[in-house]
Image (cartoon, helix red, strand yellow):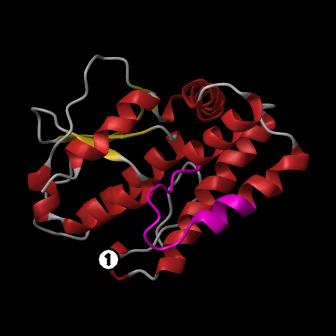
């Protein structure tokens, strides 16, 4: 199986033919990686980590509307602490960014443009990857550059690597430079509407 180099997370070569259980393994590995960093950063206590991970895995069923672990965890923590989901996500992102360094950029360049439907039309597996990992490809004027955005920097890293792997399997495709980005909750929340419109 191909692997994302920074996190060591494996993903199926062909997303379109992968069993649901293989996709869940990717999501589980992303959740585990998040948990490790959040334990090290003091956001999670060891006593609660198993409960969060088990509840998250139980929530992953075919047709689940949200599969992102950061969104799941922030909603749980917001319920427990009475903080807003946006505040919890910001706290989680700060710790994850501290632990993974400059591998994932934080988008602070103004408005992001969603789009690239021609890319999805030419490479349908890319849409499947983005839908599974809840990452979004932004539209740039330079087609040799792809921005992959998520609230979860680990998901952005895995999606970027998986997208590159899919594009490499097509000998006729010129491989763009792929940059993973972390975005805030309001930006992430509006992206599905624009990115996956047919």
Residue 72, placed above or below residue 60? above
Residue drawn at the location 62% of the way across and 38% of the way down: 74
User: In x, y percent, where is residue 8?
Assistant: 59, 57
Residue drawn at the location 41% of the way across and 61% of the way down: 132
Q: Is residue 15 magenta?
A: no
Magenta stretch, residue numbers = 54-69
Residue 165 position by quadrant: bottom left
- In the figure, is residue 62 to the left or right of 99? left
Any part of residue 8 in sight: no
Quadrant containing the C terminus is bottom left
Front-most of residues 84 and 161: 84
Circle 1 packing at 10 Å, graded few (<14), some (14-19), many (20+), is few
Residue drawn at the location 14% of the way across and 47% of the way down: 116
Secondary structure type for disc 1: helix
Q: Is residue 65 magenta?
A: yes
User: In x, y percent, where is residue 96?
Assistant: 62, 34
Any part of residue 75 in sight: yes
Residue 144, placed above or below residue 33? above
Residue drawn at the location 39% of the way across and 74% of the way down: 13
Front-most of residues 65 and 41: 65
Residue 32 position by quadrant: bottom right
Residue 129 position by quadrant: bottom left
Residue 102, placed above or below residue 76? above
Marker count (numbered): 1
User: In x, y percent, where is residue 139?
Assistant: 17, 37
Residue tagged by mark 1? 16
């Amino acid at each position: 199986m191909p692997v994302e180099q920074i996190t060591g997370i494996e993903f199926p070569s062909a997303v379109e033919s992968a069993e649901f259980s293989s996709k869940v393994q990717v999501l589980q590995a992303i959740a585990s990686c998040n948990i490790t960093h959040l334990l090290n950063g003091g956001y999670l206590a060891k006593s609660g980590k198993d409960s969060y991970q088990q509840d998250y895995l139980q929530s992953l069923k075919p047709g689940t509307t949200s599969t992102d672990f950061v969104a799941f965890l922030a909603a749980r923590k917001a319920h427990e602490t009475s903080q807003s989901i946006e505040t919890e996500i910001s706290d989680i992102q700060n710790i994850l960014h501290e632990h993974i360094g400059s591998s994932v950029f934080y988008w602070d360049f103004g408005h992001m443009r969603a789009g690239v439907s021609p890319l999805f039309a030419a490479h349908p597996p890319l849409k499947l990857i983005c839908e599974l990992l809840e990452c979004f490809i932004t539209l740039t004027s330079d087609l040799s550059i792809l921005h992959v955005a998520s609230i979860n920097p680990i998901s952005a890293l895995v999606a970027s690597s998986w997208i590159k792997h899919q594009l490499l399997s097509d000998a006729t495709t010129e491989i763009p430079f792929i940059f993973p980005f972390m975005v805030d909750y309001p930006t992430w929340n509006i992206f599905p509407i624009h990115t996956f419109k047919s």
